[in-house]
Image (spheres, rainbow, N blue to C red):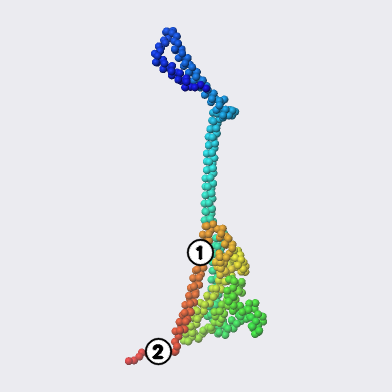
Amino acid sequence: MRKLPIALATITGIAIGGILFSATPTYADMPVVDAGTIAAVKAVKGVLDTINGYMQDVKNFLGANGPIASLLGDNKYGTVEQLLQDGFNQNANYQKASVGALEQITDASNTANARFARDMRNAQIRDQQTPSPTACTALDGGVSTQAAAVQAYDVGATIAQIHDLRAEAGPQMPSYYGEAEGVASINQEHINYYCDADDVAAGLCSTASSTPDADQQFSSLFGSGTYADQAAVNTAKDYAINLIEPVAPAALRADQLASTAGQYAAMRRRSYNARMSLAQSFVDEEIGMQTPSVPLTPLQQQYLTDIGLPAETNGSWLQVLQIEAERRVSDLTWASTLQAMPPASVEREIAIELAVNNYLEFQIFKTSLEHTTIAATALAQTVSHDFASTSRMPTPSMQASSN
């Protein structure tokens, strides 16, 4: 391969020599042949040839058959320039495809996140707005409880009214004609329904009753929470009579009330009747609370079965109160449902439990009022007894004294 610096040095030397030696220029109108000029032209031509050769060598060096091309391959798939261009184009296409793929992935991710956020919000709205089955069950239990309360008050009030008439010894009631009538009535009631072996042996009845002495047993008043039938209600009523007032005092009638002593006796009898009405009505309310009055819901029936009580279709106020208060403590169905409740349902359940608690607290408050009334009556009776004079005092004279 030729050296380019040698040719350049030759040209430079010719130009400097012409200047130093004052070479005379050649004119066209003087056909003179100058040997120096010819030599210079040849030298310049030689330099140009050298440059052209160098350019050809570079072209051959970088050509398709040059050493560089041989290092890059045999040009089977195109020239280096073509391959580089195709490669750059392919890389650019890869970059564009990568950007497009990333855009699609980002769009899909954004869409999925938006859809997930929307589903979560829909679930929150559903939980906040849709009542759970447990809330519906609790509402059914609450309605059943309140309906039973109304029936219990009605039953208790009806029994109390009958007992008030009995205690007052009114017309067509035992003791109206005397205490002996009242004693005979209560004994006959016992023989008819609660005859025991001693009564049979005494010849008062032929066979013992299926419920002997039930009118004397506390279990007749408080049993399973609901009386089985009307006969059980009557038995509880008879127990309450033996407990509070087996026999009412004889009624004050006719000329007994017209005398001064009769009026005093009537005053004491009214006080007696008021205290007996208080005591008897308190027990009558307990009877009404246990009287079967409302149908039990399927869940309430199942709860009674689970805790070993008889499966009943009708329940009392006391029993439905017991179920609503206790099933959230010991019922497995409710406990498992609570574990699966969403937060909104748990909040509703807490609100329902607070409402039940308030209901129970109010019933306790009402019972406390009756207890305090009984306590006040007992206190008044004690004070009245202690106030009685120890000796009879003479009647004071109402005449004016003279000085």
Q: Position of residue 230 (x, y in %)?
A: 60, 73
Amino acid residing under circle 2: Pro
Given residues 223 and 116, the one toward you in this image is 116
**Residue under the image location 53 percent in, 37 percent down:** 95
Q: Position of residue 156 (x, y in %)?
A: 54, 73
Res. 144 visible in picture: no
Q: How far apart are the alpha carbons under marks 1 and 2?
A: 65 Å
Q: Position of residue 214 (x, y in %)?
A: 61, 78
Instruction: Name, please, the residue furthest toward the bottom.
Output: 403
Amino acid residing under circle 1: Leu
Q: Position of residue 131 (x, y in %)?
A: 54, 58
Given residues 204 and 201, the one toward you in this image is 201
Left or right? Give the position of 294 relative to 370: right
Q: Nearer the viewer, mark 1 or mark 2?
A: 1
Q: Is residue 201 above or below residue 307?
A: below
> What residue would you read off at disc 2?
396
> What residue would you read off at disc 1?
354
**Residue under the image location 48 percent in, 77 percent down:** 375
